[in-house]
Amino acid sequence: MVHYILTRIAGLFGVLLVVSVITFALMYTVPGGPFDARALEKQQMVPENIKRQLNEKYGLNEPVWKQYALFVRNAVSLDFGYSMTYPNRTVVGIFKEQWSYSLQLGLLTFVFSLLVGVGLGIASAIKPNSVLDYFGTGVSIFCLVIPSFVFAILLQVVFSVWLGWLPTGGWSSPRHWIMPVLANSLAPILVLQRYTRASMRDAMRANYVRTARAKGLSRKRIILVHVFKNALTPLLTVGGPLAAGLIVGSFFVESIFRIPGIGFYFVSAIGSRDYPMIMATTLIWTFIISLSYLITDALYALADPRVSLVKED
Amino acid sequence: MATNNEATIETIPAKPRTNNLRVFRRRFARNKLAVAAFFFIVFQVIIAVAAPYIAPYNPYKGDFLATWETPGYSHWLGTDDLGRDVLSRLLYGARISISVGVLSQLAIALVGVPVGAIAGLKGGWLDYIIMRVIDVLSSLPTILFYILLMVALGAGFWNLIFAMTLTGWIGIARLVRGQVLSLKKTDFIRASRAMGAGNWYIVKKHVLRNVMTSMIVSVALGIPGAMFAEAGLSFLGLGISAPQTSWGQMIGMYQPYIRTAWHLTVFPSIILALTMLAWFLFADGIRDALDTNDNFSIGEK
């Protein structure tokens, strides 16, 4: 178990290294240095010798491998430098201040989609071919085919433009939360609903359920004790990465509803080609998501004694 | 290959291939939703191909006397900020959506199938390296990776296909590799090897035919997925570049004007959703029609 976790952690750092090489190469291949971009914006020429001094100051005159080594060294101590769009704010500073919005949106979305997705999944597994089952299937098809940004816009048009019930954007009161959370929960609901349904149906067909029924246990007791325990543990494996994906923010929902979270800043960083911000976000997200896979796998092995992390062959 | 060997190989599978096709058609036709989706897709493809002939206006040319028009008689679905006809732009958008979906999946199959087949057949260090590359690529968050690549490459149709292929091949490669590994143990491949067949011959003659079913399903399901990704990236301004138009791009560009000009985002949204629905239902129908343990799986006895 310890060996397994150590290998996984080593793998995680391997992935981060690859991502950092890719992101660094990306930054390096883009034509023009950061000062050219700023000079272009301010409509003034930077004299050659000043440019050379600037390059020297920021270490851009060093060979590429040295620059990369410096980048890695700084990244390890969580120093990603200054944002190019907001020259007076560090990337880490932006993360510190804006993450709470993404966190709130993500957690609200997670709770909501957990209630709806798992609820519908259980209902349709217990009563197959019932109205609820068809409703659940309908909801999951809807979630499958509608991109979140399309749903977000349709919500805005109906509830803000036509009916005028809800504000089109912002995050200041619970009234602002309704539409973003709804739009953000399409994919999580789909995953949770389908997974719960499949997992429940598998458990209900299992031998131990037949035995329990043969013993004469009530249906309620069988479902509450035998089926739930076995069917809902696997949910951990999807729930963990899902939650991780949600708390790192959403590109689409945050930018449509103007929620100042990380996703919003990331999208504007793309627009303004704010490379330090793009790279830091990529690395931090990759780290969180990979870490969540590791944690859920370990937790799953703890929760279900039948699962072994050590390969058998 | 000696001819009498060929003859014995040919006589063993009892069912002729045309029968499989007929079985597939019958099974698919049973699924009414999938059939409806199929006709919707055919209709859309025709429209996309014929867009230059049926579009009422030039989708790229603005009319500065008719900007921000709401849906009306002369412009059925209104016009945008430059006075371009929304209906015409939607028709041309179908071309992008469908060609991105289909071309990216073809490219993915062209890369993924040979790589997976080689990894499975050759084994050893080559397999090891390919699998490690797949491991690393699959641990990257897909949408984030697309975004990074598109920032580096710049928006554009071919860059988009390239970015999708770069990460997309791993799924199908893994699938083909797995199937090859289990095929390798079957008697007919062993027999073929014993008779001196090389790797290439085995891939061509046996592996491709046997992985065809799962390949078709993977490609069919991948098409709406690629459309989804294209729409998302274009929404962020990283997909299709300016003169060309795509539904995702229209939605992204005019989303800030939703209060004053709802028609600019609502129509592409609805079309996009309907298209995705149709492709998913169609792909699902194909999978159901193919996915069976009895007479359809070509390789098994």
Image (cartoon, rainbow, N blue to C red):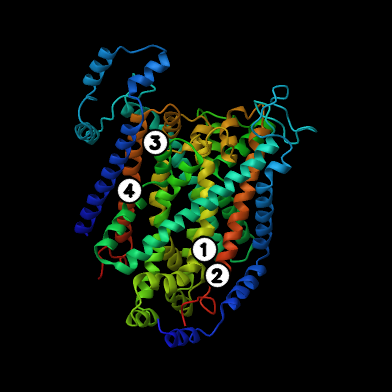
Residue visible at 40% across and 50% down in the picture: B167
The answer to whether marks 3 and 2 sit on the same chain is: yes
Which percent across, then down, holds residue B65? 73, 22
Residue that badge 2 annotates: B290
Disc 1 to disc 3, C-alpha distance: 32 Å
Residue visible at 48% across and 43% down in the picture: B158
Q: Residues within 10 Å of mark 4 (few under 14, many from 20)?
A: many
Disc 2 to disc 4, C-alpha distance: 35 Å
Along the viewing direction, whichever of B101 and B6 lies nearer the viewer: B6
The answer to whether residue A145 is left or right of residue B156 is right
Disc 4 to disc 3, C-alpha distance: 24 Å
Q: Chain of mark 4?
A: A
Mark 3: secondary structure: helix
Disc 3 to disc 2, C-alpha distance: 40 Å
Quarter location, residue A53: top left
Which percent across, then down, holds residue B34? 64, 62
In the rendered view, tell whether residue B53 sits above or below residue A28: below
Residue that badge 3 annotates: B152
Quarter location, residue A152: top right
In the rendered view, tell whether residue B99 sits above or below residue A250: below
The answer to whether marks 2 and 1 sit on the same chain is: yes
Q: Chain of mark 1?
A: B
Q: Chain of mark 3?
A: B
In the rendered view, tell whether residue A110 sits above or below residue A269: below
- N-terminal label among 3 and 2: 3
- N-terminal label among 2 and 1: 1
Q: Chain of mark 2?
A: B
Numbered badge on residue A290? 4
